[in-house]
Amino acid sequence: VRRHDPAFLVLAVGFDTAFIMGISEGGSLATLFTAHHPARCDGLILYGSFAQFRYWLPDQTSLQKLFDYIESDWGSGKSLPQFAPSMANDAAFLKWWGKFERLGATPGAATALMKMNSEIDISDVLPSIHVPALVIHRSDDVLIDVEGGRRLAASIRGAQYVELPGKDHLPWVGKESDE
C-alpha cells in the first residue's frame, strides 16, 4: 500500500482492518472506500447518508437557496434548524454552530463543496459492497429524506437498517422525548 492510497490511513494507525463510518455526505466516501478496499474493511456504518444527492436537496431551487445562505449568512449559525431543530433555541449551541461553519470552510469553499456534493450518485457502487453494513437514519431527519436512507440500505446486499425516531440530522444531538 502506497502513501497516496486511502488504505494507507488504516495501516498508518496500526490496524490491518477497520469499520468504516460515514455520516451524511461522508457516507458516499466511506462507501467508495469500502467498495475499493473490502479486505481492509470489517464493516460499513452509514448514518444519515444517501446514495443520490436528491435526497438532500431535491432540485436546483433548493440548492440555490443553500448557495444564497452561504453567500449572505455563512458563519452565523442560522442554518442550525436545518441540521438540529432540537438545538435551535440553545444560544450556546447556535454560537458553536456558527463557529463550526466558519472553521469548516470559507463561503467560497462551502459553495464549491456543495457543487461537488450535488453530483453525488453512488447507486451503481452499492451492489459491490460485500462487508457487513449498518445503515442508520432518523425517521423525520430534517436534512436528508429518510427514503434516502431506506433505499441506501435496500441497495446494499444484507445491510441492516435501523430507523431511529427524531428530526435532528446531527448524530450527537436529539432525544426521543424532546422531538
Image (spheres, grey):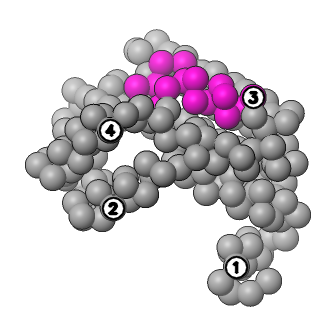
Q: CA distance from mark 1 to mark 4?
A: 34 Å
| Residue at the disc numbered 1 | 5
Q: Is residue 134 visible?
A: yes
Residue density around tag 2, few if under 14, some if 14–19, many if 20 or more, within 10 Å: some
| Disc on the earlier residue, 4 or 3 | 4
Position of 69 relative to 111 (above/below): above
Q: Of residues 127 and 106, which is closer to you in this image?
A: 127
- Please report the bounds of the magenta region as a residue range: 139-154
Name the residue beneath numbered marker 2: 112
Query: Contact (CB < 8 A) between labels 2 and 4?
Result: no
Instruction: Tell me, for residue 60, which label it has, or none.
Output: 4
- Evaluate whether residue 17 shows in this view: no
Q: Amino acid at mark 3?
A: Ala
**Residue 162, image x, y percentages:** 69, 25
| Residue at 41% in and 32% down | 58
Q: Residue extending furthest bottom?
A: 2
Q: Which quadrant, please, contains the C terminus?
A: top left
The amino acid on which the numbered mark 4 sits, given as a three-letter code, is Gln
